[in-house]
Each structure stands twice: as structure tokens, then as C-alpha cells.
Image (spheres, rainbow, N blue to C red):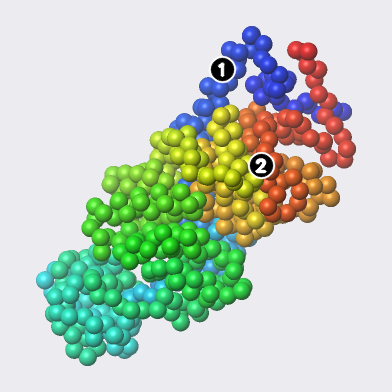
Amino acid sequence: MDKPPIVRPWGFPDPLKPLKNQDKAAFKTHLIEHNAHLDINSPRAPSTLVSTICTIGEKCCEEAVLEQMLDAGMKGARFDMKEGESRDHIILLRKMKNCLTDLASKHKRVIPVAIIGDIKGPQVLTGKLYKAEKIFLKRGGLITLTTHPGWDNRGTAEKLYIDHRNLPFIVKPRDRVFLDCGRIELTVRGAVDTDIVCEIQSDGDIGENRDVFVLNVPFELPAITEKDKKDLALLVEEGVDAIFASAIINKHGVRDVRKALGEKGRGVLVFTKIENRMAFDNFDEILIESDGIVVNRGKLGIEMSAERVLQAQKTMIAKALKDGKPIFAFTDYLNSMIHRNCPTIAESTDVVNSVIDGLDGIILLDETSKGDDPVIVVKTLTTLAREAEAQLWQWELFRSLDIISCPPLDPSHAICIAAVMAAMKCHAVGIMVVTTSGKSAQLVARYKPRCPIFAITRYGSVARQLSLWRGIFSVHYIAAPNPCYARDVDLRIQYGIEIGKIKGIIAPGEPLVLVNGWRQGAGFTNNIRLVYVSASDPWVYPHSPAPHGTYHKIQPDPYP
């Protein structure tokens, strides 16, 4: 018995033929209905294109919570190696991996999530507290900062450990000391042996392992510490996908991190955190050496005035967009949601403006690692980012990026630009990219299409890393290769379409842009097709042969 015929777009038997006059009204009606899914309140509204990176805590590693966070839009898991013991983070990482494995078995498909290790870097941090999660520092009071190792886990409101032994010898009276991204300011009264006596200039709570910064006093620390090298070795063994490198001030620091990763970690992405004025001044050379950028707005705000941090962020975003590299930011995006279920108006506006500026993703810190309800936080961020994306003028953004791509271009690069333009012209609901190394998907994402990019790959590390690019939904295809390469490409695209249907992004009758290589392997991307989704196999028009050599019966053309 023959299967039902394929569903033609708009109900027409052949979309490649000119429409009759009586069909033009129906075609116009379809275009209106086709754009309805862009409505924010529509049940078919797709997930946000912005990548959400969540710092992982104990609560996040519960299977039910993790599943809801993934459904809400989480694409990356960050493990903060500068807080607590490295071994505890490795245990937490393995626990999360086990949860992901269970979820994959439950849903019968792999869920790519980028695993990110955030190393301490050459930072100065406070120690642990004595029987308390936080201490309160009152303005006008005195506090002693000590480098004596006996106080590393006995911090109180009167005496707090600092892990930089030379600090008492390089500070002077009236120097300004900032704790926890500048939230608490101290003024040095004097230093004796291992102790620094300071006067508290601003009230505030402070927890364990918070950063310490002294204005206009260079610490002269190495780009990567011995602890960082040990942590990198552990993270590489656990198969992390990216590293957030802290306190890098020039391109040589990025190279030191890559060298420390070694041969085993050569495939790990290195994202450089811009945390001080010197790093901002050397941003161009750091961008060239890095795979991506992370903007630490809190620490930048210590050395730069608050109004200039926003300008610096916009400048770095523009340069990263031009270079085609992902850029993230964090600090105080949804900080009030650690113990609340809704953000402030200022936080909501900050998220929306950052997305409109062009951020590829936003990093959540204590909001998810220590917050009361990490699922609500991720859902809130997704909603805000999706609202911001609706305000973008995608065509103008594409044109500005296209203009700076000077010919002659690599064929793969040119094909990816054409794919984005085709998707905009036909209002495609998605771009399917069959990729081996992930480079073609990154090139498509570089030109910021208005629709999601489904990157279909057989390599798990590539799928997880691509999740960090804005607009990319990674699809890990694990079936064995088909002997016929053309058929194998069709099967991978079909699988990607099924994932799109599950996510509610793709529906029958809607246009798709397909990008793949003409032969097997990386570097051969030169094929672009525009097709329409069918309800059943064959899955697109023009159709491809069904399995086992059978063909579907095609209805006769009523307009010969």
C-alpha cells in the first residue's frame, strides 16, 4: 500500500512552477501565517538564539532540575575552579555527565552541552570563612587582611585571609582595596608583617573566595599559576570543551594557557576574560589569539568608571562581531534572582540591551550555582533574550557584516554567506548545516541569520563546542555512516529536521536552507539547497529516494 503523498508547501503540488493568478492570494495568506511563529506570545515561538551559560552547583546536578534547565535554554555548564577544592568540582562534573547520560537514554538522543572550566588565573582571593557562608562588613569599622596560612579557613568580620603573600609589602597607607568585584571598598591604614589593617568604606556582605584588587598597584603575577596547570590537567582528562582564562593582559598569556593545555588539550577552546584596563588596551591582540571573549564587567568597573564600562563592552562586542568570534559577559545580570523569583527592571533592561548590542551569550554565576531556583532564572533569561532578539534589524546587521568580508573569499565562506542571504529572502525557519569540524556552522553563525542554525555533526566535542555560538542548535548524529555519501547526508539532514520538529521550530510546508559538502570530510562545503519540509518521508521537496529502494507515489500536476 502506498504511503500518503508528500505535503507540498502552501498546498501546491509544485512550488518551483509559477503560481496561477487564483493562487496568489493563497500564497500571500501563507506568508502572513508563516511569519506568525515569530510572535513572542505564539506557542511556536522558538527558543532564544543567545547561548545561556550556567554555573553549576549541587542543585543543578539533580536530573529533574537539569532537564528543566536544558529545556529552558541552557547550552553550557561552567565549573568555577577558583572557588573550593578542585576535586569537588571534578566530582560535580562527573555527576552532571551521569545526569546527561540518563537524559540521553530517556529521550533517545544526545543532548549537547558545552562543558567549561573557569580557571583561577593570577588572581588574589580571600580565604574561607569560619562557620559562616557570609560575613557583614560595616562602614567605618576596621578589618585586618592577613596572609598568614593559619587563617586560610578561619575568616571572620575582624580578620580575613588573603592568598597573596607579598601583598603586605607592596601596599601603602591610603591605598584603595576592593573586594568581591568592587562591592566592598577598604582603605589601607598600615601593614605589619603578614597583616594589613584597613578601614571599611562601604557596607556589604562577602562570602568565601572573593577576588581582591588594589587600585593602581600591580601584583606582578605570572599569567598561569601552578594551581592552574593542575586544574587544566584535570579538566582535560575529564574532556572539557572550553576554558575561561582569567586575568590575561596580553596575547602571551593566551599562548601560555594553550601551552599548559598540552597536546591532549589542543582541541579545547580558550576564551579570554577581559578583567582589567590593561587587557582592554590590548584587546585587539588578545582577540586574535583567543577562540572567544568573556567580559567581566564587575572587575572592569573597578579600574574604569561605571559609564565607561558600557562603552567598553560595546566596543569589544563590535570587534568580536567583525572577527566572527563569540563574546560573553557576566556580573549582575540577574543577581537579585538568587533568592527571588523575578528580576528588577534594571536587570531586565540590562539583559535586553546587551543582547541587542550583539552578545553571543550571558553567563549566570550565583544565580544558578547557589540560587534558590535555577530553572526560573534560566527561563527568565531566555524570555528576556527572546524579546530582545525581536527588536533586532537582522537585515541591516547582515549587510554590515557582509560588507567587511573582502573578496576573494574561501568557497566555504562564500557559500555560508549565500545561505544566510537565502534564508532571509525566503523567510526560512532554519538553516541545516552538515558539518565535520564545525567551521561551516561557525561561518553561518558569523553573519547572524534571523533563524536558528542546526549544526549536524557526528563528533560530540564539535557538537558541544558549537553550542557556544549564537543561533546554533547542535545536533549530535551518532548513527553509522551510510555507504552512499549522498544518502548519508540526507539521513543526517532528516534527523536534524526531526529535532527541529521536536523543538517546535520546524513545521511541514515551511522553507529550509541546507548547507553541506559535495564530498566527505572537512573543508568541502560548497552545496546550498532551498527545500520545503514535508510531513513524512520523503522529508523535503524535491524528494529523495526512500529507504530500501522504494519511492512514494507523486500526485499528478494539476497545472501541466
Asked if residue 227 is positioned above or below residue 479 in the image, the reply reads: below
Q: Is residue 95 above or below residue 410?
A: below
Q: Residue 407 appears at what percent x and percent y?
A: 56, 44
The residue sitting at 33% across, 75% down in the picture is 125
Q: SS of the residue at dot 2?
A: strand
Where residue 151 appears, as percent x and y from the top left, is: 30, 85
Q: Amino acid at mark 1?
A: Lys
In the picture, measured across the screen, residue 263 lies left or right of residue 157, that is right
In the image, residue 235 above or below residue 1: below
Q: Residue at x 21, y 80 (%)?
A: 171
Residue under numbered circle 1: 28
Separation of marks 2 and 1 at Cα, in angstroms:
27 Å
Query: Which class describes the residues within 10 Å of circle 2: few (<14), some (14-19), or many (20+)?
Result: many
Q: Which mark is residue 550?
A: none
- Left or right placement of residue 34 versus residue 247 in this view: right
Q: Earlier in the sequence, mark 2 or mark 1?
A: 1
Answer whether labels 2 and 1 touch (C-beta < 8 Å).
Answer: no
Disc 2 marks which amino acid? Val
Q: Nearer the viewer, residue 446 or 387?
A: 446
Quadrant (top left, top right, bottom left, bottom right) of the N terminus: top right
Q: Quadrant of residue 557?
A: top right
**Residue placed at 45% from the left, 71% from the top?**
252
The answer to whether residue 5 is left or right of residue 138 is right
The residue positioned farthest toward the left in the image shown = 140
User: From where the camera sits, is residue 80 visible?
Assistant: no
Between 420 and 345, the one nearer to me in the picture: 420
Foreground: 479 or 122? 122
Q: The C terminus is located in which quarter? A: top right
Of circles 2 and 1, the one toward us is 2
The residue depicted at 51 percent of the width and 60 percent of the height is 291
In the picture of the structure, the residue carrying the numbered disc 2 is 515
SS under mark 1: helix
